[in-house]
Amino acid sequence: MKGKKIKNRITTMFGIEYPIIQAGMIWCSGWELASAVSNAGALGLIGSGSMYPDILKTHIRKCKQATSKPFGVNLPLMYPQIDDHIEIILEEKIPVVFTSAGNPAKWTPVFKAAGIRVVHVVSSVKFAQKSEACGVDAVVAEGFEAGGHNGREETSTICLVPAVADSVDIPVIAAGGIASGKAMLAAFALGAEAVQVGSRFVASEESSAHINFKKKILETNEGQTKLSLKQLAPVRLIKNKFYQMISEAEAKGASPEELTMLLGKGRAKNGMFLGNLEEGELEIGQVSGQIDEILPAAKIIENLWQSFKTAHDQLSKKLF
Amino acid sequence: MKGKKIKNRITTMFGIEYPIIQAGMIWCSGWELASAVSNAGALGLIGSGSMYPDILKTHIRKCKQATSKPFGVNLPLMYPQIDDHIEIILEEKIPVVFTSAGNPAKWTPVFKAAGIRVVHVVSSVKFAQKSEACGVDAVVAEGFEAGGHNGREETSTICLVPAVADSVDIPVIAAGGIASGKAMLAAFALGAEAVQVGSRFVASEESSAHINFKKKILETNEGQTKLSLKQLAPVRLIKNKFYQMISEAEAKGASPEELTMLLGKGRAKNGMFLGNLEEGELEIGQVSGQIDEILPAAKIIENLWQSFKTAHDQLSKKLF
């Protein structure tokens, strides 16, 4: 990849060439994806939320063998065996942890004391400010359009990113709706210093998503995902049979308990990892409508970077 | 206002200096706002959706007296006395009509035959393509974060604008989440040739919104609006007592009929025009969280334009 690079607080902090971070996505982001992304000059993350502790350890070790570049771990803070995960992250001297889905107050000081860079994923200005007060090094401002679990405020990327950037001094990484150079440029225009990309990497060769799910993403058009299960924890899903079932129950006024029953166990694994496209839960962002090819992670990064530069050139020509 | 202007398909088509269009908002955009916007070099629109035909005629005539610049009318296509409205628009030789909330197939040819420029507001790629096939001159791609009535797809601006821009040849105007130069720059990065701004103009001196509503917008923070009444016609509202009532009914599985009963008549007028902040319907976008001052429309346009240029300079310095 040619052309000048961006040097800013995020690329410097993580020691990466491109201001692109791969999201840690359950069932989709193991060592193969994380190492491929890091080897290509962006920041790869192992998504620990769908891993037992021994599996996480294996993925970290394999990732270290596959890349000499920095990579991180995404840690949902409500993970049931969180103490075990944190012990492994500390033992393995992971340099960067992205925390999500929980309160960063308890664990941020622990990571910081170990010299680990901590980034927390937020969906609102309020949580961004709380995270900064907890001592995190950066925040991901993740908009409503993002796949998977999502904030109750439903604030979209174009509204969230500038509001967060204005409310904190630490750098802001934009997430939600970003799978092209145009959207990446928009994120920078809004005040972000890097982007976190999820959906686009699910449909990569190295992602551990089932091939059925990857192909389903290519077929998914604009308007075919929806933020669902809002009474439990809001999650953006492809509108499949499972989604319809939940949606009908919600329209009839189903209680959280009834929805929990319907959800059952293992839906996400069933859908995304085992490829059951109708009974499973398929977590993906709105931007899936713009994804039409399964590509190697390195190619995804190259395309993003080149189209980002092209978008910038075109914008400058269009204006003034 | 100094500095070079943008010459593109939208500014040329409408004969305006700035690629900024004021949204036609019920109860908020009469002749005072539309003429102030047009006089300042952007495109003002009279929002006809809350006007009886004779009121619309009065507003058009007063607007003509107040400005020699072009202005348009926003016409919701499901308006009950639409034939009367259209007759007035033709008689008064309005040069630009923005249609919304309905199918543009029937009326676009009528307007075009009269030499009127037609722009249709869409919330999806599918409707953008249909609108182009109907012969409209441009589309507004309006994202989920926008205030008032909104699409069922819930596609956000950052996902919708590039998808629409890639799917049609006519120019695209971005709407939803735009009240600052940063967001305006993001819209251009995404492929828009102009922006349509609603919420920011509701809190203008010339808007016909009740002063209580204008002040309420200043107090509204990020996360305090919600897309509501999805079973009827989705509409983004401030979370007030009326919203809570609807929201509780929906959680209990209320039918569309029950919701229609709860909605009753005149809620929007009551809230936005008469200033009843608890019982009324307060339509506003997510970007209300970034609005903290009531300003003259001309000042809003100047601020948008200056901050747009500043955002562009900053972006270019940040990159490459």
Image (cartoon, coloured by chain):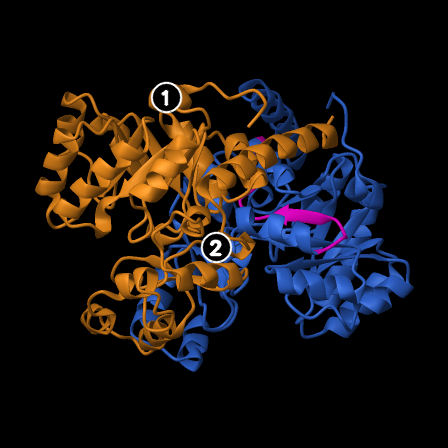
Chain colours: A blue, B orange
Under circle 1, the secondary element is loop
Q: Is residue A303 above or below residue A193?
A: above
Q: Are marks 1 and 2 on the same chain?
A: yes
The chain containing the residue under callout 1 comes to B
Looking at the image, tell me whether mark 1 or mark 2 is earlier in sequence order.
1
Is residue A89 visible in the rendered image? The answer is: yes
Mark 2 residue crowding within 10 angstroms, few (<14) / some (14–19) / many (20+): many
- Give the camera-side residue of B174 and A279: B174
Which of the labelled discs sits on residue B15, or is there none?
Answer: 1
The residue segment tinted magenta is: A168-181
The N terminus of chain A sits in image quarter: top right
- Give the camera-side residue of A270 and A252: A252
Left or right: A253, with A37 as reference point: left
Residue B278 x, y percent position in the rendering: 37, 73
Q: Which residue is mark 2?
A: B286
Q: Is residue A108 above or below residue B235?
A: below
Under circle 2, the secondary element is helix
Residue found at x 31% / y 76%:
B249
Residue found at x 90% / y 62%:
A114
Q: Is residue A172 magenta?
A: yes
For badge 2, the amino acid type reads: Gln
Is residue A100 visible in the rendered image? The answer is: no
- Give the camera-side residue of A183 and A285: A183
Q: CA distance from mark 1 to mark 2?
A: 30 Å
